Amino acid sequence: MTAAPLVIDVEGINKHFGDKHVVKDLSLQVRQGEIFGFLGPNGSGKTTSIRMLCGLLTPDSGRGSCLGLDVLTESAAIKRQVGYMTQKFSLWDDLTIGENLDFVARMFGVAQRREVVARTLDELGLGGRRDQLAGTLSGGWKQRLALAACLQHKPRLLLLDEPTAGVDPKARRDFWEEIHRLSAAGITVLVSTHYMDEAERCHRLAYIAYGALMASGTAHEVVAAQQLSTWSLSGPHLQGLAQTLGDLPGVDLVASFGATLHVSGKDAAALEASLKDFARRKGLTATAVAASLEDAFIYLMQNSQDPFAGGK
Amino acid sequence: MNGFSLSRWFGIMLKEFIQLRRDRLTFGMIVGIPIMQLMLFGFAINSDPRHLPTAVVMADPGPFARAYVAAMRNSDYFRIVGTVDARDADSLLDRSQVQFVVTFPPGFHRDLVRGKSPVLLVEADATDPMATGGAISVLNHLGAEVFAPDLPGVQRPGMAAVDLRVHRRYNPEGITAYNVVPGLLGVILTMTMVLMTGLAMTRERERGTFENLLATPATPVEVMTGKIVPYIVIGLVQVTLILLAARWIFQVPMHGSLLVLYAVVLLFIVANLALGITFSSIARNQLQAMQLTFFFFLPSMLLSGFMFPFRGMPEWAQVVGNALPLTHFLVLVRGIMLKGNDMGMLWDQVWPLLLFIAVVLVVGLKTFRRTLD
Ligand SMILES: Nc1ncnc2c1ncn2[C@@H]1O[C@H](COP(=O)(O)OP(=O)(O)O)[C@@H](O)[C@H]1O
Ligand SMILES: [Mg+2]
């Protein structure tokens, strides 16, 4: 995998909207065939970054290439080889399913357009509904249609912006299976998401908060880089304890995980001492566990809100 | 690098047609606006313009004729642009360079002195009857005032010094509909063409579909021109509707060539569409596009010579009016329908339209945003 060529390679990209610094010095490397997860809270600049990759927004500064083409000057050529699925459904509500596919295929100059559209409809299982207006589809179907539309011209790179937001679990699972199939066929996929389980399905990740890249690498590397010790607390009456726990020495983060609480901190010794004492007093069980990706992300998000504790 | 693709262009046009067909409101507007405005503006609005350009044909120069011309000038209603021969005078009227031609016949002086009431011919461009009404009524009194002091006793009681004959050219009965209906052609086209194209692009932006369009290799020229074509067709349908109404409801004559008329209409449609597309690349949303349209529409209505006779407007208003395509289109349409103007006679009004299109398109392509910035 490491030998695969870089499909996305950007460095020091910045974007301002007015006096708002939305993307700060972003650098990203994505290799061919990879599924690259792009994570971060709302408003952190994921959509803006993706738009800059496919030439929909012009970076204020920085340099980079996408599919070997310059992001700043060759966006027309980039567009032809990229499939971009927008965060909000943005096909035409007042065109039918068939008309939408046909229009997009025309815009990309797809050869044998009719056959391609017909095949896309069949594979979607929408052959019988080709004359239905796209605006009347449910969320899950809209998402499948949007993905199918941007695959028709056989892009080498897929940019998917929160493709599974508001989609039911079954449709999400099918969707991810499709993504893995595409990746196996050599298509590079950059996908932004909020869901932890989806983050874990990616080969590599980047976490971005308030416009700044906080961590990147495989899920393992991202977790390890935070150097967190994590303990799982279980027992009766856990609900009211989060506040008290947070004030203990060595505790940086408290998060509920189903019936247990995950308590994490950078200072392993102080954390262990505090927790063992606390558990004994309250009659709880404390067990050391491996920090999960979610612990790492919550930790990152918490830290990024404090401008003096940012990951720089 | 990314040249014009006929197939993409066709795709954009096709999509626009399909969307238009499904948009009942817009479809209603296409038919509704002409009908509504035909009814609203079927009535006349009064006005009393002065300083109307007038040419003099002087077959018999003499002190009386000169005194008469001076009196016309003093009346404020006439601005004498010069003395010409009869053939040139006709052409000046045809090209709308003058509103009146006053002809002093041979032997005017002699007949006047002998009390034989010589004919004084006044030809008026009556395509807009409101523009000439006031001036003509002034002429009726002028003869007595000018000649009476110098011709004591010559006049027999009850007999005018001159036999004033007014020819209302192009619209002999002074029918307002002759003026208003061709004018409506221009007003309706301005309204619907600018508005609908203005909305076409901002709608994509507002619904978020513009992002999808931008993510495809389609170029600005393809998008702009592809989106324009359906509206050209709509414009021609509207024109046909109005022309049928002009013919069968208002009995407006058609003296010129229908082909020339449609050619001029096409030019005017393109001018308005170019403006609409430019508005839509400046505006951020549909509301702004609408506001820009009305900002343009109002002076077009008031200062083009549609609402008020152009020559009755103050200088500054005429300057503004001359920058509006409707002003020139009105002269063109009235010229073709009522005066039977042919191609060769239209150039004076055609070049301002061409200039307008060129300027607006340059602005439009410069402001077209290829990105979402
Ligand atoms: N076109 C725009 N104009 C002004 N501000 C914008 C624009 N697009 C995004 N923003 C702002 O930039 C920030 C990042 O937005 P976005 O990239 O959409 O974040 P994300 O996709 O991670 O939720 C947000 O604060 C958003 O309000
Ligand atoms: Mg987003």
Image: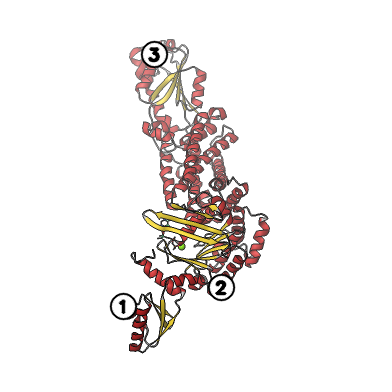
Residue contact between numbered discs 3 and 2, judged by CB atoms under 8 Å: no
Q: Residues within 10 Å of mark 1 (few under 14, many from 20)?
A: few
- The amino acid beneath tag 3 is Phe
* Mark in front: 3 vs 2: 2
For mark 1, name the chain: A
- Of tags 1 and 2, the one toward the viewer is 1
Q: CA distance from mark 3 to mark 1?
A: 112 Å
**Which image quadrant for residue B295?**
top left
Please give the name of the residue rendered at 59% of the width and 33% of the height, measured from the top-left corner. B257
In percent of width and height, residue B237 lies at 57, 45
Vertical comparison of B362 with A259: above or below: above
Q: What numbered label is drawn on residue A247?
A: 1
The amino acid beneath tag 2 is: Arg
Label 2 sits on residue: A173
Disc on res. A178: none
In the rendered view, tell whether residue B81 sits above or below residue B179: above
The answer to which of B328 and A14 lies nearer the viewer is A14
Q: In which chain is the residue bearing label 2?
A: A
User: Ligand 1 shows up in which quadrant of the image?
Assistant: bottom left
The quadrant in which residue A264 appears is bottom left
Judged from the image, the secondary structure of the residue bearing numbered disc 2 is helix
Closer to the camera in the image, B94 or B190:
B190
Identify the coloring.
Answer: secondary structure
Q: Which residue is mark 3?
A: B64
* Residue B64, quarter of picture: top left
Neighbor class of circle 2 (other Cα within 10 Å; few <14, some 14-19, many 20+) is some
- B287 relative to B316, above or below: below
